[in-house]
Image: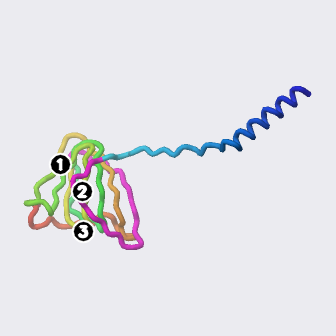
Amino acid sequence: MKLIAATSFALFAVVVATTAFGAAPPLVTATPVALATVHQSYRISVRKPADLMVVKVKVPPGGSFGWHSHPSAVAVAVTSGTLTLYDSRYPNCGPKRFSRGQGFVEPRAHVHLARNEGTKPVTLYATYLGVPHGAQPNMPASAPANCPA
């Protein structure tokens, strides 16, 4: 009988303590998969309905996206290697290189080319910020007049 009473008292104490102090909610954790510093200002505009898409991209040495544009802004974070960007907004379309920890934002509907001119693979995360629902996120394009072919 003493064992039953002791067990009942212990169970009662646990219930009272849990009720009085409240059970702590489970901890929410967030682990960055890509982190980059962006040195440009940007604005985005989203038309409804739109899709948000995050992709992990691996670009082997010599790999190229070809000349293309996007129907929405795209935020890019490079997590390994060096990506070379040829952008029609730059004078003479000169190359800009982005290495691990660096990023950039590609505006909607402008033509550019990105490729891996290095000897190591490039890994990047691209976040498409508002692709019109059902549209393709990448659209092939011709090289702009101010860019080398």
Q: Is residue 95 left or right of residue 25?
A: left
Q: Element type at marker 2? A: loop
Label 1 element class: strand
Q: Picture quarter containing residue 32?
A: top left
Q: Amino acid at mark 1?
A: Arg
The residue beneath circle 2 is 65
Seen in the image, is 1 located left or right of residue 78? right
Between 61 and 71, the one lying in front of the other is: 71
Name above or below for residue 55 compared with residue 142.
Answer: above
Distance between mark 3 and mark 1 Cα atoms: 21 Å
Counting from the top left corner in percent of width and height, residue 41 is at 23, 59
Asked where in the image residue 148 lies, by quadrant, the reply is: bottom left
From what the image shows, is residue 8 above or below residue 107? above
Q: Position of residue 79 (x, y in %)?
A: 30, 44
Q: Residues within 10 Å of mark 1 (few under 14, many from 20)?
A: some
Q: Amino acid at mark 2?
A: Phe
Residue 108: tell me if it is visible. Answer: yes
Residue stretch in magenta: 36-61
